[in-house]
Image (cartoon, helix red, strand yellow):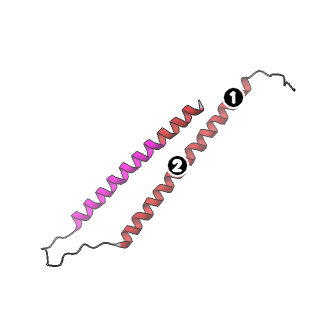
Amino acid sequence: RVDQLKYDVQHLQTALRNFQHRRYIREQQERQREELLARTFTTNDSDTTIPIDETLQFNESLQSAHRGMDDLIGSGTNILQGLRDQRVTLKVGHRFLPETPHIYI
C-alpha cells in the first residue's frame, strides 16, 4: 500500500511537472507572438541590431525560480497529505486489531 502511494505520488508529480512545462512553453510562445505583432518593422539598414533587454531576461529567470519553488511547495504539500492519510489509515486499522499479550524474553 505504501509503495503504491509512493508510485501514485511520483506519477502525479511527474504529470504536474509536464503540465506546468507545457503551460510555460505555451505562455512563452504567446508572449513572443505578441512581441512580434507589436513590433514595427522598417527596412533593413546596413547596421542591423537585435535589442536584448537584460532586465527581461532577469525577470524570466526570477519567474522560473518562482515556478520551481511553487513546484517544491506543491510536492511537499502532497507528501504531507499522503503521510496524514497514512496516519489516519493506521489509526483506523489499529482500532480493529485484537489486543495481543506482550511476550517478554
Outermost residue on the front side: it is: 105
C-alpha distance separating marks 2 and 1: 27 Å
Q: Which residue is mark 2?
A: 74
Residue pictured at 59% horizontal, 29% vertical: 1
Residue 92 tag number:
1
Reply yes or no: does residue 74 show up in magenta: no
Are dots 2 and 1 in contact, CB under 8 Å?
no
Outermost residue on the right side: it is: 105
Please determine whether, in this image, residue 90 is positioned above or below residue 33.
above
Q: Quadrant of residue 81?
A: top right
Please determine whether, in this image, residue 72 is positioned above or below residue 100.
below
Residue 20 percent across, percent down from the top left: 41, 49
For badge 2, the amino acid type reads Gly
Q: Specify start and end residues of the magenta stretch as a single range.
A: 13-40
| 103 sits left or right of 39 in the view | right
Residue 15 percent across, percent down from the top left: 43, 42
User: What type of secondary structure mainly makes up the magenta span?
Assistant: helix
- Of 104 and 60, the residue lying toward us: 104
